[in-house]
Image (cartoon, rainbow, N blue to C red):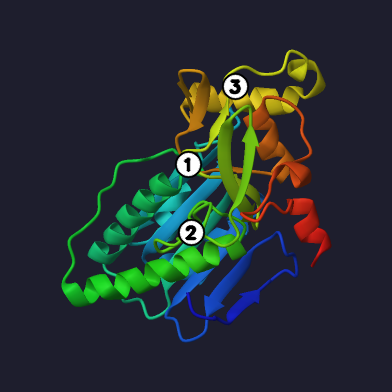
Amino acid sequence: MAASTIKLFLPQGNPKGLRTAEVSNWTGKAIAAPRSEFKELLERVELQNSGVYFLIGTDPETGEAMAYIGEAEVIKDRIKSHTDKDFWIQTVVFVSKDENLTKSHIRYLEGRLIEITKDVGRVKLFNSKMSGSRLPESDLADMEVFLSLIQLLLPVLGSDMLTPVRKSENGKKNQNTLYCETKGLKASGMRTPNGFVVLKGSQAVLVERPSAAKTHPGYMAQRAKLLENGSLESKNDHVVFTKDMEFSSPSAAGAIIVGGGTAGPSLWRNKNGKTLKEIDEGM
């Protein structure tokens, strides 16, 4: 993504309240609001346009991040129909300022957004069926640009659901990759803007330390959840990460791998053997 200038506007002066976002030389516009300001959102004239929208919140039963992705020719009419869904607390709408988004365009965007959200795997989708739409080559190119700017703006407006846990390495080993070994098992990972990611294929111990459930119950509960949902898979005498998994810190990532508490800055090392602590101290 090239360097971009983003214009944020807070109509009420509240950074957590209703806000709009635009990118220089882009025909699109984003409008975001918490559910507590749903009435104010519906009064926005932009919601008379066609576009795509996100309802973002938490699954009340599992505590997992959850989202609904939709499209409509008149956004206002459609999102009003979702008031019976109690999981969402935030709405983000994307429309075109020149009103040139057709039904085919927004169906295509909805399909691609659902596809990307599934691939990224950060949230559980309330709706996962992709309608999609076939577009002429020129329209498809335009919608991919529109899509890339949705991906740019959504994190600025408070959601990482479209952001991969790590950037593409384009076939090259990332220079920031870190490694750890425990009991002959090997894992790799790297820092991310949200914490630390353990890379797919990394190995972890099969059995937790006897005291771990008492000394680090939060980490062990998270580990149990990863085993339950298939993010960790048993392989003979160890377990393997089946996908890239992001954690809040190097220590949190390390605890899942070693089966108990650990000092992440001392556990993780670069290819030259320097610990993460040493790397940080040398900056």
Q: Which residue is pictured at 66% across the width and 50% down the height?
A: 36
Q: Earlier in the sequence, mark 2 or mark 1?
A: 2
| 219 or 149, nearer to the observer | 219
Give the residue drawn at x 41%, y 55%. Answer: 77
Mark 2 or 1: in front is: 2
For disc 1, the neighbor class at 10 Å (few under 14, some 14 to 19, many from 20) is some
Residue closest to the far top: 210
Rounded to the nearest angstrom, the CA distance separating label 2 from label 1 is 14 Å
- Asked if one can make out residue 89 in the rendered structure from this viewpoint, the answer is no
Does residue 165 sit above or below 148 in this rendering? above
Helix, strand or loop under label 2: loop
Q: How many marks?
A: 3
Q: Nearer the viewer, mark 3 or mark 2?
A: 2
Residue 221 image position (x, y, % from top left): 66, 23
| Residues at marks 3 and 2, CA–CA distance in whole angstroms | 30 Å
On the picture, is 153 further left or further right than 17? Answer: left
Relative vertical location of residue 243 with respect to residue 182 in this rendering, above or below: below
- The type of residue carrying mark 1 is Lys
User: Which quadrant would the C terminus be assigned to in this image?
Assistant: bottom right
Task: Give the image quarter of residue 260.
Answer: top right
Amino acid identity at mark 2: Lys
Residue 132 visible in rendering: yes
Contact (CB < 8 A) between labels 2 and 1? Answer: no
Residue at image mark 1: 200
